[in-house]
Amino acid sequence: MHMGKESAWWSMAPPGSDEDLERRLAMASPSDTARGMFLRATLDAVRTLGDEEAVRRCQRLSGEENLMDFFIYPVSVNLRMVFTAARLLEDRYGGFDEALRQLGSRAAESFLASAAGLTLQLLARGDVKRLVGNLPSAYRASVSFGVRSVVWTGPRRGRFTMRHEFMPYPFQEGMLLGVLRKVNARGARVRGFQLSTLESDYDVSWEA
């Protein structure tokens, strides 16, 4: 991970800290929402990676007995769930960042198994570059916030940018890598760069 200009922010709010979470929550407005598929994916990931007690703790944060894929929920709820889940799993996976990557990867699996994810794969027709290129529009259909784009730097290499994105960069690294692995992209690599609290870039590449 490379830091951008906000090194002061980094020193004051280390990733995974209460300060980091509170800063992200403070930047979220009531209009910043995500589809229930992402919250449910977090619970599915915790169930797979952790245990039922961890699932119950995360679900209590949602305030919902049953999360519906296409209902909208405040992104603040999803943030609290993801941070809580990563803290519960960090000892098992060697640290907070790696727990976030695992959660992001599992979230990608759940998303791609949803109706929206299946549509995305259908439109890509097995072409990895087309799939990655369509991810910004998939995000737009699933969350109310943020701007995402891809700039290609080679046949199988590009820079994926996220602006006004609430999840920490390791979660998105795992998410992007999970998408690439799902379509059997050989030698897939994702390297994230946290530029500021809600800004990050990702170098994405694969061999074939």
Image (spheres, helix red, strand yellow):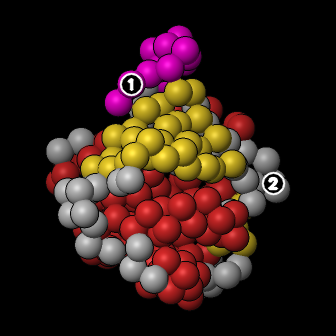
Q: In the structure shown, which secondary structural element does the residue marked by tag 1 occupy? A: loop
Judge by depth and name the residue closer to the eye, 58 or 163.
163
Residue type at mark 2 is Pro
In the rendered image, residue 43, in percent from the top left (x then y), is placed at 43, 72
Residue placed under numbered mark 1 in the picture = 2
Residue found at the far front of this picture: 155
Q: In the structure shown, which secondary structural element does the residue marked by tag 2 occupy? A: loop
Residue found at the far top of this picture: 8
Judge by depth and name the residue closer to the eye, 71 or 61.
71
Residue type at mark 1 is His
Left or right relative to 179: residue 131: right
Left or right relative to 178: residue 74: right
Residue found at the far right of this picture: 31
In the rendered image, residue 34, in percent from the top left (x then y), is placed at 66, 65
- Magenta stretch in the rendered image: 1-13
- CA separation, marks 1 and 2? 31 Å
Judge by depth and name the residue closer to the eye, 190 or 70.
190
Residue placed under numbered mark 2 in the picture = 30
